[in-house]
Structure formats: C-alpha cells, structure tokens
Amino acid sequence: TTVCNERTGRSGSIASPPTHLDITQKIDVNPPKGTRDFPPEEMRLRNWLFQNFREVSQLFGFEEVDFPVLESEALFIRKAGEEIRDQLYCFEDRGNRRVALRPELTPSLARLVIQKGKSVSLPLKWYAIGQCWRYERMTRGRRREHYQWNMDIIGVPDVSAEAELISSIVTFFKRIGITASDVGFKVSSRKVLQEVLRRYSVPESLFGRVCIIIDKMEKIPINEVKKELKSAGLSEEAVEELLEILSMNSLAKLEEKLGDSVEALADLKQLFSLAEKYGYSEWIQFDASIVRGLAYYTGIVFEGFDREGKLRAICGGGRYDRLLSTFGGDDIPACGFGFGDAVIIELLKERGLLPELGPQVENIVCSLDQDLHGAASAVAAKLREKGQSVDLVLENKPLKWVFKRAARINARRLILVGSAEWQKGMVGVKILSSVANTMGTEGNTAHSSRISDYG
Ligand SMILES: OCc1cccc(Br)n1
C-alpha cells in the first residue's frame, strides 16, 4: 500500500489504549501539540466567525454539507510533491486500513459528488466549515489543525462561477469591516502556465509538479526553483521564459507576450469584466505569479492577501476541472475556495476589528433561602418555557455572591424568590443591565412582579 510518507516510512499504528488510568498519574491538561481548546471567550469569537461564513454562504444560495474528518488516505495521495502530502496526518487503523485526518475539504466534496452521481442535479453550490489537519514537525511551532470555510460550485465551466465565489468572499470581508484598502485578491490562471509548457513541449503529466515548484517561489531561493524546474525536465530556455511570464502583473503585457488567442487571457478578461459588474474591481489584480499550492487546479486561481504584507494568505481557491475524473467520476467542471480561521483573526486584531463578544443571559434566578430552591426552579422553568434564558443559582449563596455572578455573566435581570413575596405568588425583580436602562426602565430597577407577567 502507498504510505503517506515514504520519506520517513513512518506510519503510525494504534497501540491498544490502557485499560485503566493510574489515578495517581497527573495528566497533561493541555491539548495535544498543535491543537487548540475553545474555552467560552474563544468559542464566542469562533461562533461569530462561522456565523458570518454561514450567513454569506446562505446569501449566495449555497447549501451546507459536511464529511468525516477521517478519510481514506488514498483521497489525498497525489504525486505532485505538495506540502499537504508531506504533512498528511495519516495512520493505519485497527482494521489495517490506511486512513488520514483530512488536510482539506475539496477531495471529500468531490467524493460525495461522485457518490451522489445522477441523484443530484447540477450545478451544485455547496459550502462546508470543517476542521482540517496536518502533521508538521513542531520545530516550526505551527498549528496542526485549523477550521476551513469552503464554498464550491460544481458543474459550471464558465468563469462566472469564479466571479461569484470571489464576490462571496468580498461580501464576507465587508460584513466584518474589512475593506479593499486592507485586503486584495491576486488572480491568475494556470492556463498561462499550461500554454508556456505547451510551447516548450513539456509533457502534460508534469503540469501539477511544475505548478507546485512555482508555488514555492516566495518561500525558497529563485535558483532552487530553477534547479527543481530543470530537474523536472524543463529546458533552460523554458525556465527563463516561464519566470519572465510569471513576473507579469499586466494583462496587456501578457497579451503582448502570448498573443490574444490564449484561453487564459479570455478567462481573465471575462473575470475582470464581471468584477466590474459586481462592483468589486478595486479588490482584484492580475498577478501571474499566483499558482496556489494544490496540484489539482486547472484554470483561474486566486488568493486573498493583506495589503500590508505582514500575514500569510488569508484564503485561496480556483478551478479544478479534472479532480472528479481523477477519482473515477465524470468529467465535471468545478471551482471553489478555502478560507482558514487563523489568519483572518490575526488580520482583525491588526486592524482593531475584533468584535466585543461578552457572555449574555437574560435572567439570573435565585432563592433567598434553601427551602425555596424548588420555587426558584419552577420560576426558571416558566421563564425558559417563554424562551427567556436563565442562569439558575443552584446552591444557597449570599446575595453578594449572586450580584457578582450576575455581573460576570452579564445578566439583564435578577429574579429573587423570597418567602414573603412567594406567599403572594410574587417574586422580586431587579433590572441589572445597561441595556434594560437604555430601554427607559431605570425608574423601576427593583420591583415585585407576578411571575406570569414575564414573557
Ligand atoms: O493550510 C494548510 C493546513 C492544512 C491543515 C491544517 C493546517 Br493548521 N493548515
């Protein structure tokens, strides 16, 4: 079987877990290397981010899908020398199957489309938000998991699909306060590369590998890139021509170089024209050096970048018309993007745009003595039936403690169940939060109320 990492030959095997934990053993309370916990504050920010992903996806008429985080390793084994392959989080399961924690969502999406076959009608507009994994030497201290938002359009060969996808990301950025002066999209087409390789009779089979080598241009010295291109079989002349074209950021200059019959040019011109119609021209620019680091892209590719140049790519995507057929499916055109949950948060921090997201509960309910806890529970149940959120104080606590907790959880109202009022079917109500006061109720911040009055 093909293992995910021939270089080390290491393929993890599942040792049987211990049958009991030694109670004296102090466990490490931190999450595994490269992974994160999401305590409430971080979870609120994550939910806010994902809610914006979801609302934009729904605004564009996309349907949500999801797949197992664990997939057959074979789904990700490609021979183009991608980083994602070298860092595959793969192992052999207890049934001796080669499996991997997904490093990306697109292959799973392609698998599901093929599985659905004729039972779904094209085009499909699907989105997913899923945790993706890589196993990287922690020497670089980078994370091993992140969440990725993906949107994909399956079954539309025209560049109108890529234009729609970029529009959805622009819409997302605008929703969270990011403008075209903060972020832009570098756009190109791999058909430019394909045309140059064709002119130098480089075999199609080398296309993916050449793209992956070029994608490293920003990360390794140019001489190393040239060396790798030559070792892949490109002539000195082809390499020089390729690098000259990749340095272009003007469509006019590219046309001068390649002539106006090249399909890549028609695609890019159409994309820029549609961008004008959508109203997001100021967000995009042609940059021939953009190839992206996934072997399966075949056409338009794009990536979102921060204009201050401090951060890694925010998102990226493109057309992948051959992926489904390489999985044995029909020749169905497709395009999509991935948007990670880490760089965007760094950008929002940089720009002072992180949202203020404190806890929020409408009511805190407490009994003034222990034998009224049942009454307090009944009050909480009634409020909850009416859709009111309630933090019910579960133990006998001094009022000072209750007020402190009410402030900490940002409760808007304190409901006190005391014997005197309870005899009359009443409870004490104290309006706590500033929100309540702005609603013009400062006057009666404390009063008794029949619990049935509270909707
Ligand atoms: O963007 C590449 C990637 C894939 C999986 C997990 C992480 Br962290 N990063």
Image (cartoon, helix red, strand yellow):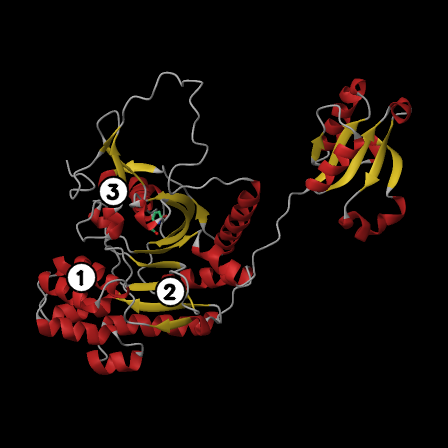
Q: Earlier in the sequence, mark 2 or mark 3?
A: 3
Indicate yes or no: mark 1 CB to ligand 1 under 8 Å.
no
On the image, the x and y values in percent for residue 240 come to 15, 74
Q: How crowded is mark 3: few (under 14 residues within 10 Å), some or many (20 or more)?
A: some
Looking at the image, residue 408 lies above or below residue 184: above
Task: Give whichever of 288, 12 is nearer the camera.
Answer: 12
Q: Look at the numbered disc 3 and give the secondary structure of its residue.
A: helix
How many marks overall?
Answer: 3
Residue ID at (19%, 37%): 10
Which residue is labeled 1 in the image? 210
Task: Give whichever of 170, 49 is nearer the camera.
Answer: 49
Q: Look at the numbered disc 1 and give the secondary structure of its residue.
A: helix
Task: Give whichever of 275, 176 is nearer the camera.
Answer: 176
Q: Which of marks 3 and 1 is nearer the N terminus?
A: 3
Q: What residue type is labelled 3?
A: Leu
Looking at the image, residue 151 lies above or below residue 396: below
